[in-house]
Amino acid sequence: MLLAALVLIPVLCGTAEFLVRDVRLGRLILITAAVSHAALAASAWILSPPGIFGGWLALDSLGLLFLSITSLLFLAASFYGLNYLKHAPVSGKTEDEEGEFFFLNAPEARFNGCLLLFLAAMTLVILSQHLGILWVAVEMTTLASAPLIYYHRHTRSLEATWKYLLLCSVGIAVALLGNFFLSVAATIETRKPVSFILIDLMSEAVYLDVMWLKAAFVCFLVGYGAKMGLAPMHTWLPDAHSESPSMVSALLSGALLNCAFLALLRAHQICVAAGQSVFSRGLLAGFGIFSMVIAAIFILGQKDYKRLLAYSSVEHMGLLAFGVGVGGGVSVFGALFHAVNHSLTKAALFLASGNILRAYQSKICGHVKGLSSRMPATGFLWAAGLFAITGMPPFGTFMSKLMILTGALAAGKYLMFGICLTVLTAVFWGMARAMLTMVQGDWIEIGPGCVRDREPVLSFLPGFLLLLIVLGLGMMMPDWLDQVLREASLSLGALP
Amino acid sequence: MIHLIWVLLLLSGLLLLGSSRMMHCLRIVAAQGILVGLLAVFQAECPGLRVFLLSATVIALKGFVFPWLVSRAIRQTGTSREVEPFVGYGASYVCGAVFFMAAMELAKRLLIPYHGVSPLPVTAGLFLAMVGLFIIVSRRKAVTQVLGYLTLENGIYAFGLSMAYEEPLLVELGVLLDVFAAVFVMGIIVFHIQREFDHMDTGRLTALRD
């Protein structure tokens, strides 16, 4: 019942948004849906709801973790959106950041509706235990989020939307091939029907044909990895995350990439149960390291701060894949903990970037100076977010990165450890150089403005609270989170 | 009969590589869709209501609805009806031959130990998927990329129909619905691209780069 409500509430509210004319009512529906979804997700921690539809939808510990992240992020993004959408004129044109052209915005009802359908699709990805439904839900997230990227209607966002739509759809089609390969692997010996529910597959996993299973995992890695942002399938990510409105970027980076990671983890779980964990872990670690290196190369000398954040997402997704690929209890625990920390921090950073973009009307780092004097709250958020995302203590990201690296050392992967450390250092240098120069300095007055920009509470409070949670997690890990993380890493085959 | 359908699917992939007229490509993709739907009927061991329902849905969607959506996009944008390739048609045929050899090699490696099953489904399904990917990469216009995506989906779906065990009807319909929604959204975006850029040449969509 709880699980059905988690999916149905966003669907119904999203459909209602398309029919509603009044803008205020639309925003009220959005906030109500976000709050009720968060309340349901919170109660799932206490209630442990059973599976429904014969086990097709269920909430295991991995799912509970990712559901909480998604719900919390959506709540923060929708409160931020209240302020953001109020300032975006619907009728009449807005001038582009570089002053090159005028553009329109999409109707707000359509935006809110797609946002809620996006939430519903992500929830379905998290809840589905049947690999077929998982596929359908992941494709639905692509289709629900494409109009969101195209909210500001101009050429750049259109280009980003097309790349996103095509690359992710092609990737997910390859994942469908992986589904079929897996089905062949399961039925090739017995020629009997096999349930595609995860638990059943895992219990029968030793009977899976190894060759077809490996081919299936490769397809899943390429397909869901493209959606997750692993290099070299990541090319849509910087464009889509930088051109979409900031709250959508926050959701894409913080929640959607996690959902794709979850889909990949389901495939990994099957490989572990089949005894092929060495194969799948090796591939995950390889792609993870490659993504981190590529991201580091593009972060150094990056001039656009939203693209900087997007490449940082690629780097962190690579780190997550690497953490799971290294194996061992500490690394996997660290990777899952890092998923939580990264999502919250990246969302806070993207929300802050929205404020910067509106105040300075430019996406170039060089054009932004003096945040600390002009917009102190956002400037503080930006600097704190930088320290959080690069893994400085006492933020939680420090602990999670430490765990992943310690695990890599313990597993004897010295070369990978070395590459990882170099990449993290390079990324820290690149990001700090770009982002700190934005906070310091004197701001050049662009137009008739006052000494300080008016900073509405809703523009920085959600981000501030998210960073506070990351700080809290770094200083003290609550028992209930620790237990769920342990259960989740055990389910991924990590030895305790 | 099944072998005939597979051979026709293979040939349609080859035809698609060398065709320079967009409406011709569209009709080939429509024919592929109908063949995939027929495959569903002839492939089933015990044809029942479920199989006929699925086959009818596939033929309707892949054979008529998807091509109609794409032709509507072509008409609305008023683009020229010529496929503009990055890779010339002769070279495309050569690539097609290479893909066929690669598909045969892959089919040989992915063994099917029981008797009475030819390697044709694996070969043809993978070949069609590779042709679809190649079309996406090697053609300029955004609308031909949609055709490539449809071919990719046809190849994968045909492979799934013949090799994978029956998925629940809900999942099959979900897959078809997803592809429908994808093509629908792509059609809308293609129209917007033509309107914003005044061209559909994806090779010129290079404003976002590092």
Image (cartoon, coloured by chain):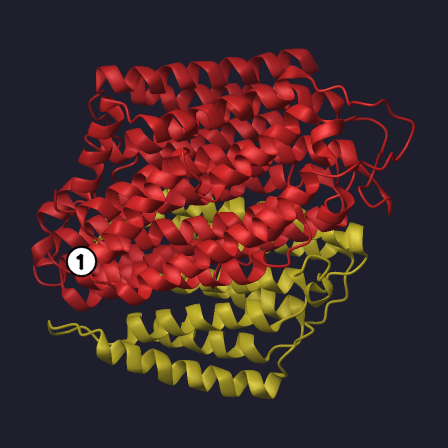
Chain colours: A red, B yellow
* Residue at the image position 49 percent from the left and 79 percent from the top: B14
Q: Pick whichever, A394 or A90, lies toward us.
A: A394
The residue labelled by disc 1 is A277
Quadrant where the C terminus of chain A sits is top left
Check the image and report above or below for A250 versus B94. Answer: above
Q: Pick whichever, B102 or A344, lies toward us.
A: A344
Q: Amino acid at mark 1?
A: Ser
Q: From this viewpoint, is residue A82 visible?
A: yes
* Residue at the image position 74 percent from the left and 35 percent from the top: A370
Check the image and report above or below for A170 versus A245. Answer: below
Q: Report the residue that reaches farthest toward the right.
A: A448
User: Seen in the image, is A161 located left or right of residue A348?
Assistant: right
User: Seen in the image, is A170 located left or right of residue A155?
Assistant: left
Q: Position of residue A300 (x, y in %)?
A: 59, 59
* Residue at the image position 50 percent from the left and 21 percent from the top: A465
Q: Pick whichever, A344 or A165, lies toward us.
A: A344
